[in-house]
Image (cartoon, rainbow, N blue to C red):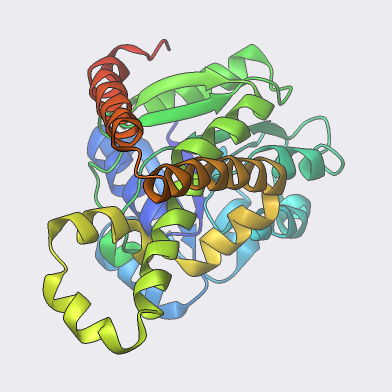
Amino acid sequence: MAKLQLAIIGVGLIGGSLGPCLKDRLGDDIYITGLSRTESSMSAALLRGAVDMASADLEAVVSDADIIFLSPPVLQIVPMVERMLPYLKKGAILTDAGSTKQYVWEHLKKILPPDIYYVSGHPMTGKEKSGVQAADKDLFVNKCYVIVEDTGAPPEVLERVVSLLRLTGANLTTLDIAKHDRCASVISHVPHVAAAALVTLLNRSQGDMDSCLKLAGGGFKDTTRIASSNSDMWADICMTNPEAITGHLRALQGILGEVIEAIEQGDRPGIYNYFAAAKKRRDQILDKTEKMFEI
């Protein structure tokens, strides 16, 4: 079997976790090249074994690659593909880890030649810390990894990518592109906005800040953990999934309005039912999610 040539563009938390994961599974049957924004990041990727070769020379990184894994912030994906297209060999496969899919595909389908393929993906995993220093070869294990169905890749190309990603230990599933962006908004994007809002609320507590910090325990830390995530990444996500995110934020605003009204009216049964229904549904969700993956 020929050695797989994989290029990782953006060897940060996700790309830097994928590299050592696949090296661990495939050993000498894979050769990984990488590119990051800074020399220090590329040096760290080499030191951690995330890549076999790192370079700022895009041609050197992608020209021999069978598969190119794109893991920069979402708004950088299309410009990066435009830059690398002259260097890609016929039959090369692009796949990405972007958190929004429709924006990327709408732009890529206008520029990709027929002999360069794109398989849209989204690993639903991460940490509040970013960069290759936070990478973990087990980051994908038992986490959802979405493969978007409708980006035109032939079945054999799709299977090649899926077969590689199965080695990560992720739970692979499929969604159409519009549903992915709607669901990612509910499950990931709006919670990140909400976590940042809670921190902003604390920041605006004025003279109570020090006292609030003394009281901050596990609940505050748990609900705001993801507010420590990469700001570039989250700004790009909001800019590339605006309809879903703003729609769900308005829905959340409406829910909070109902809670405010119930509290102001002294409606204890209404408030009790609000919390009880949420607890019941969350408990059901935790039990159900392990049984929902099909590929």
- Counting from the top left corner in percent of width and height, residue 240 is at 69, 51
Residue at 34% across / 74% down in the picture? 202
Q: Is residue 165 above or below residue 200?
A: above
Name the quarter where the N terminus is drawn: top left
Q: Nearer the viewer, residue 225 or 64?
A: 225
Q: Nearer the viewer, residue 163 or 72?
A: 72
- Counting from the top left corner in percent of width and height, residue 260 is at 44, 49
Q: Of all residues shown, which one is farthest toward the right?
A: 110
Residue 199, quarter of picture: bottom left
Residue at 26% across / 22% down in the picture? 280
- Left or right: 240, with 291 as reference point: right
Q: Is residue 236 visible?
A: yes
- Counting from the top left corner in percent of width and height, residue 182 is at 61, 33
Q: Nearer the viewer, residue 188 or 265?
A: 265
Q: Is residue 129 above or below residue 186?
A: below
- Counting from the top left corner in percent of width and height, residue 293 is at 38, 15
- Left or right: 180, with 36 as reference point: right
Residue at 37% across / 47% down in the picture? 263
Q: Of all residues shown, which one is farthest toward the bottom?
A: 207
